[in-house]
Image (tube, rainbow, N blue to C red):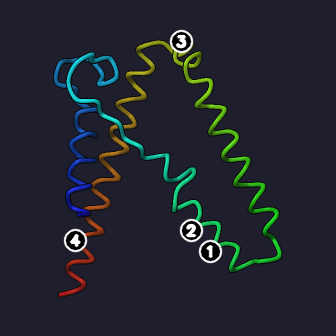
Amino acid sequence: MTAAGVTVLFLIAINMVFPVSGRPVAEEGSGEPFIVPLAIPYLAGPSALASVLLIMNRELNRWPEWLVSLFVAWFFSGLILASSGSLSKVLGKRVLIAIERLMGMLLVAIAIQMVMAGVAQFVGTL
């Protein structure tokens, strides 16, 4: 299952860095939609919940601070998402293309790191 997810992530990232038609993936009107919900689990999913639970287990008396920091992160993430339309107009197409390619490189690095972790885990179980 992990190998399939890493493969899909790697292919999406390669398509972001080296678009086939010369245009960024976001500008293509037809074809497959490439949606990478990478940030969603980090904001509101199981990993955020697990992180907060682990931190709270270590220092239970600081739970209000952890809760406030979580809400501050959600607030700023929501603010960025809500202003994304006007932000894209300000940045322009060239900057958005550069950001898309940079994020593609980041996804390639994450996919390679996941492959290496999987290989290390497989070799460790032999």
Q: Which mark is residue 54?
A: 1
Please report whichever mark, 2 or 4, sits nearer to the chain's N-terminal start: 2
**Local SS, label 4:** helix
Determine which residue is flagged by label 3.
Answer: 89
- Amino acid tagged 2: Ala
- Please name the residue shown 41% across and 15% down the image: 94
Q: Residue at x 57, y 50 (%)?
A: 43
115 in relation to 91, above or below? below
Foreground mark, 3 or 2, reads 2
Of label 3 and label 2, which has the lower sequence position?
Answer: 2
Identify the image quadrant of the C terminus: bottom left
| Contact between labelled residues 2 and 1, with CB atoms less than 8 Å apart | yes
Query: Answer yes or no: do the residues labelled 3 and 2 have beta carbons within 8 Å?
Result: no
Q: Return the mark for residue 50.
A: 2
**CA gap, disc 3 and disc 2:** 36 Å
**Residue 120 percent across, percent down from the top left:** 26, 75
For disc 4, the neighbor class at 10 Å (few under 14, some 14 to 19, many from 20) is: few
- Name the kind of residue labelled 4 in the image: Val
Between the residue at mark 1 and the residue at mark 2, the CA separation in whole angstroms equals 6 Å
Looking at the rendered structure, the secondary structure element under dot 1 is helix
**C-alpha gap between disc 2 and disc 4:** 25 Å
Q: Residue at x 30, y 33 (%)?
A: 34
Disc on the earlier residue, 1 or 3: 1
22 left or right, relative to 65: left
Between circles 4 and 1, the one closer to the viewer is 1
Residue type at mark 1? Answer: Leu
